Image (spheres, grey):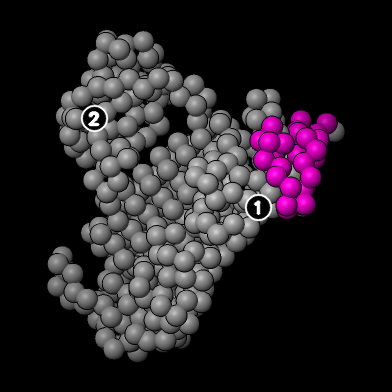
Amino acid sequence: MMSDPCITLSSYNPVGDGKTDDSAKVQAAISAAIAQGVRLIGEPKRYAVHGLQAIGRLDFDGAGATFVLDSSAYPADTILYSTVAQGAQIPFIGAIAAQADTLVCGPAASTIAAGSVVKVALGTDPYDSTQPHFGAVCSVLANNDGTIQIDRVLPYAIAGTSHWIAPITTANNGSSIRNLNFDYTVPVENVALWIDSATNFVVENVSGRCGGVMVQATYCDRGDLRNVCGDLQATTPAGGRLLGGWQARGIDGRNLSATLQSDSSAAFLESWCMEWDVDLKIDVHCPNAAQNNLVHVAGGSSDIRIRSLAIDSVAPVLVVGSGSNPADVLLGDVDIRGPLPINLPLYLMDGALSINGQRRGALTQATLNIPLVANMTNTSALCDGVVRRI
């Protein structure tokens, strides 16, 4: 039986001692695998690297390899950045209505053909002026002299001061990154694996020690996270995250776990993340964990479901914090073990709630710090499928 074609990392002769800079050789192997459309296979060695880029579809089986960050200089402090290549940005202006699927881009965009894949960046984000208010990778359904219909319905109205559209010349569709570990030798709040502008990606069996974000997903549409485990070493709340999301939708995560060494967030979903469905296990080793949300959902994010949430903490914790409507977050089974009180803002629940082995009626307001919210009349939770007063 013939085996699938592949490239081995060892054929590019990296040293793999965790000290010698192997960035150029590992980058060459990644670029060759993408160009040839074949799988890249690593081996269980430690590769000192920084600023690796995968532009296009990458199929990478690390086979137990560890990428060790050896630079603290931005943007090299991202270990592996998986993204697209795009053509020139075509700017245009004009207000865009909620639920619209057409963009009046003007004559400069008239050459973008139906069937093309494009990236759109619309408006300026109110939370980060360096980012668009809405960004996405879309397919063009029709182009009528620069009036472009895309395969996405825009979720909200956007002011018409600053937009652009650009054709994607190398797509990031179907990337798969498996069996890979991360570590670092420099004190930096880095990103280990950054998935950008991707569709249908898979990240599986990824773990290690991270100074900042283990997996960051930006402007992505549909992705699977499986068996992702991070030992988060960050020293500030903004840095430590197992998962970071920014305008990413349709993400399914199973068997995700984080060990927090500082007052970090295990999951930090900002700026219109939608349709996330994840399982989370969080071990908190920080005595001031209540200073930051273990799960943070804000910036217009919605349709976020935490199927199961297990927390074991050495200190009182703030479980879920959000700048969004509480109805936008649905909690499944929640099992928390740690000192009281547990600060669990009220969200919709359709699973079992357990605090230090106590369930449902045994829980009291002294056990949980559950504030009233504007759109609900009673301090209650939907546990085991039944609304019960806490």
Q: Is residue 333 visible?
A: no
Task: Looking at this view, name the residue that lies furthest to the right.
Answer: 1
Residue of label 1: 68
Residue nearest the observer in this picture, 142 or 167 = 167
Image position, residue 208 (x, y; %)? 62, 60
Residue linked to disc 2 = 162
**Residue 3 belongs to magenta span:** yes
Q: Residue at image x 44%, y 20%?
A: 87
Q: Which residue occupies the foreground of this view, 381 or 45?
A: 45
Three-letter residue code for mark 1: Val
Vertical placement of 243 versus 170: above or below? Answer: below
Instruction: Identify the residue shown where x is 40% and y is 44%.
Output: 248
Residue 322 inside the magenta-drawn segment: no
Chain part drawn in magenta:
2-28
Element type where label 2 sits in the image: loop
Q: Is residue 133 above or below residue 243?
A: above
Label 2 amino acid? Ser
Seen in the picture, residue 380 relative to 251 is either above or below; the reply is below
Q: Is residue 7 visible?
A: yes
Q: Quarter-wise, where is residue 91 in the image?
A: top left
Tell me the SS state at disc 1.
strand
Q: Number of marks in the image?
A: 2
Q: Which residue is pictured at 23% across the width and 45% down the height?
A: 126
